[in-house]
Image: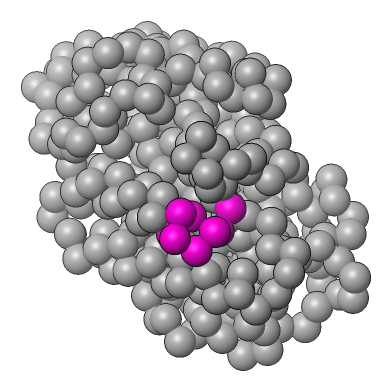
Amino acid sequence: MGVTLMHHSKRVLLTGAAGFIGFHLADRLLETEKDITVLGVDSLNDYYDIELKNERLRILQEKHGSRFVFKKLNLADKPAVSELFISFAPETVINLAAQPGVRYSITHPDAYIESNIIGFYNILEACRHCCERQSGFRQLIFASSSSVYGLNSKIPYSTEDKTDSPVSLYAATKKSDELLAHAYAKLYSIPMTGLRFFTVYGPMGRPDMAYFSFTRKMIRGEKIQLFNNGDMYRDFTYVADIVEGILKVAASEPPVNQDGFRYRLYNIGGHHPEKLSDFVTILEECLLKEKLITKPAEKEYLPMQPGDVYQTCADMSPMQKDFNFTPKTELREGLEKFVSWYKGYYCNDDSTTISK
């Protein structure tokens, strides 16, 4: 399973590389860092459209050639993960691979234990041995989620808040990842940074997410469902802002914290919650502008669903303080870019029918 490397290059191992955020991060890394090799890892499971995942990989390989290396791999395969780390000897590991989705975790719990618990444990073990084997290992950056805040009613959410009341298995697995990472950072001196992402959206996004589903249904003339009667608030974060935040974190190694080891945790969110019904209105306006719909969608108002929370909002002051970073993309601008991409990728030029 050897990996062919460019000599004297920075080596980044990126899991979830065929995923939404992973694709955008790999592309940006390779565009901005000319002396870098990115080894992308992904299981390419069928949770959503594999064609979209393959398209992301095709773009990365076409744009960046041998500087982007891809390996199909299930992180639950511990020997394969260990062998890959030995072969590639990464300097930085960015773990974005996970089984996402709150509602899916209610009906498919095994997928979350395998990917988010076992898979992440295997990454931690591989990083542990990587640190023992080689000098120059910089850090592990791993994705967590705003879902860990669960029943927390304090707004905005701070990384100092208690997060011991998850309302979904997905949230419980992401909180477990943070606890495992904290222990490994302490026990084995592995520099680590955890990032809690808040409702990421944008071009090449995940078809299972609400904004994507709304778009598809509106174009088809189907009714859309708004839970809690549309009275929910989300801290939507444009994907380019998430990527910028990750790059800021990756540029510096974690300092020694007050407990004497290198571990830190941040939120990355827009810090401006949008009401779901307002979000849908802006999305409709973007679709009307692109002539993908001719009238607003019919709406069905439903009660709150299991695993959902009423509001999310990120306290971004630590990111501002440590990295001079706050997301900049306004919701309308981000949705305009998403709709423009959606039109080009899924729709015929002269109709409003789905072509893929």
On the image, the x and y values in percent for residue 259 come to: 47, 40
On the image, the x and y values in percent for residue 347 come to: 54, 41
Query: Is residue 251 placed above or below 181 in the rendered structure?
Result: above
Residue in view at x 65 percent, y 25 percent: 322
On the image, the x and y values in percent for residue 270 come to: 51, 19
Name the side, left or right, on which 165 lies relative to 298. left
Name the side, left or right, on which 137 lies relative to 151. right
Q: Report if residue 190 lies within the magenta region.
A: yes
Query: Is residue 298 placed above or below 265 in the rendered structure?
Result: above
Residue in view at x 22 percent, y 22 percent: 152
Front position in the image: 148 or 190: 190
Secondary structure that dominates the magenta span: helix
Q: Could one spot residue 83 in this view of the protein?
A: yes
Tell me which segment is drawn in magenta.
184-191
Asked where in the image residue 328 lies, by quadrant, the reply is top right
Query: Is residue 316 placed above or below 341 in the rendered structure?
Result: above
Front position in the image: 234 or 169: 169
Residue in view at x 53 percent, y 47 percent: 261
Front position in the image: 136 or 292: 136
Name the side, left or right, on which 223 lies relative to 336. left
